[in-house]
Image: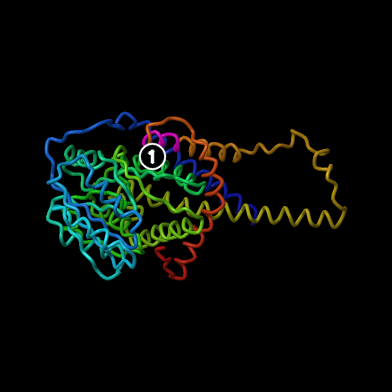
């Protein structure tokens, strides 16, 4: 049994290193293509764009969200804004209705049915060739839309463009840790864009050609991850998705461990179940890197984190049990561990170096992601919070997502 566990362990470590190195190689192959633009940008043509803002009990942020759209560096007569109140029980609808004086803003109210139903109501009201969504707790950089639209101008085959998500105003160590995670996500999303393997078109200002919804249909409930499922559907139908690294959208993130746990449980549950729903495209050559790399690497990450956490817990328990037996047998000598210590017996097995390599590669990804998101080089001290918090908490939502999938229990949205 121990031999099998060791074999699985080494395979997992190898696969983790392989995934990280694959991203690294992709970065060096494409680094000259990564452009971070400063200042204003002019397009040859400014297509009309509709942005749908679905909201449920977002009275604290909706005003600032809409104001950020009104401040975009894009011709005002080319932007339509559709605000959809999904049955809020607070003052969200009243705040939305305050914007009806703007000629390019329409407000709709409906019974609560979930985000995908609010988005679909907005899609039914959309008459422009381009459409996107902005979550009601997010705020856009004034140059974000024009930079996204430049990708469509450069390549007519591009069907959707995702932005870079940045944590807005992190206040505590939970949000500081997420800030590092979001930096990593910017890096990974850009690399997946080069690979043609993007698997999520996030709610905060992903812009689509309306043709996507005309051809493939509207949003699905999709295990409360409609932004992931539509990306899977696009990949299955060979619709190109790009990532615009210098289109910044600032989003609010969970303040507490409990809220973070609920959010990530929903995300991981959505990934697992969307992957199951689209299992027929897994490891199929015609679906490219999305099929051979994106989905498998996500599955590997979930399994690896769960296995390694279980192994750590088992080894810790075994160690404590052996110490209890030792204590009952010969008593405890506080000085004994130090008297017997010898540098010769330090563990220098190869997997230790592989683990160190993994940490180095992860830190590298945070550095590149931070540069893409903030234009700043260097390792942030917040990486300590990231490793500490996510190493302890992440395995719990990963294993719970697996358990919920096994018993067909959907996690709540909030």
Say which element carries label 1. helix
Figure quadrant of residue 376: top left
* Colour scheme of the rendered structure: rainbow
Q: Percent x, y for residue 156?
A: 16, 42
Pick the residue in front: 323 or 115.
115
* Other residues around mark 1 within 10 Å, as few (<14) / some (14–19) / many (≥20): many
Q: Is residue 143 above or below residue 90?
A: above
- Residue 362: say if magenta: no
Q: Where is the C terminus found, in terms of image quarters?
A: bottom left
Q: Is residue 317 left or right of residue 306?
A: right
- Asked if residue 175 lies left or right of residue 120, the reply is right
- Tell me which secondary structure the magenta stretch mostly adopts: helix
x, y percent for residue 231: 29, 53
- In this rendering, the count of numbered labels is 1
Residue at point 20%, 38% (across, down) = 150
- Name the quadrant of the N terminus: bottom right
> Would you name the residue on which mark 1 appears?
187
The residue range painted magenta reads 365-373
**Residue 365, position as x, y percentages in the image:** 44, 37
Nearer the observer, 31 or 172: 172
Between residue 127 and residue 79, name the one nearer to us.
Answer: 79
Q: Give above or below for 325 relative to 89.
A: above
Give residue 329's position: percent from left, percent from top: 86, 56
């Amino acid at each position: 049994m121990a031999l099998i566990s060791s074999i699985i362990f080494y395979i997992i470590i190898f696969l983790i290193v392989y995934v990280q190195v694959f991203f690294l190689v992709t970065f060096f192959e494409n680094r000259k293509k990564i452009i971070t633009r400063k200042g204003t940008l002019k397009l040859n043509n400014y297509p009309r764009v509709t942005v749908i803002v679905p909201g449920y009990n977002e009275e604290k942020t909706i005003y600032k969200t809409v104001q950020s759209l009104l401040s975009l560096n894009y011709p005002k007569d080319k932007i339509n804004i559709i605000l959809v109140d999904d049955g809020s029980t607070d003052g969200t609808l009243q705040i939305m209705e305050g914007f009806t004086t703007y000629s390019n803003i329409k407000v709709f109210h409906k019974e609560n049915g979930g985000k995908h139903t609010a988005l679909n109501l907005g899609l039914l009201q959309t008459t422009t060739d381009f459409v996107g969504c902005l979550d009601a707790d997010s705020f856009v950089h004034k140059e974000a839309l024009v930079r996204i639209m430049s990708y469509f101008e450069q390549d007519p085959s591009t069907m959707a463009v995702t932005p870079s998500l940045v944590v807005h105003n992190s206040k505590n160590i939970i949000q500081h840790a997420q800030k590092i995670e979001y930096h990593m996500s910017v890096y990974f999303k850009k690399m997946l864009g080069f690979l043609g393997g993007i698997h999520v078109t996030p709610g905060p200002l992903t812009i689509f050609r309306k043709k996507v919804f005309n051809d493939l249909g509207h949003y699905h409930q999709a295990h409360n991850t409609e932004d992931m499922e539509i990306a899977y559907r696009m990949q299955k139908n060979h619709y190109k998705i790009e990532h615009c690294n210098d289109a910044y959208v600032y989003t609010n993130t969970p303040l507490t461990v409990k809220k973070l746990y609920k959010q990530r449980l929903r995300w991981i549950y959505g990934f697992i179940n969307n992957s199951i729903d689209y299992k027929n495209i897994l490891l199929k050559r015609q679906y490219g890197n999305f099929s051979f790399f994106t989905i498998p690497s996500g599955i590997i990450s979930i399994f690896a984190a769960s296995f390694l956490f279980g192994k750590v817990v088992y080894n810790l328990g075994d160690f404590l049990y052996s110490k209890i037996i030792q204590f009952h047998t010969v008593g405890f000598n506080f000085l004994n561990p130090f008297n017997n210590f010898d540098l010769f017996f330090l563990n220098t097995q190869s997997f230790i170096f592989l683990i160190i390599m993994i940490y180095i590669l992860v830190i590298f990804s945070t550095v590149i992601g931070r540069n893409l998101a903030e234009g700043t080089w260097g390792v942030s001290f917040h990486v300590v919070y990231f490793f500490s918090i996510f190493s302890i908490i992440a395995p719990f939502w990963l294993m719970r997502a697996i358990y919920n999938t096994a018993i067909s229990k959907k996690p709540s949205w909030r």
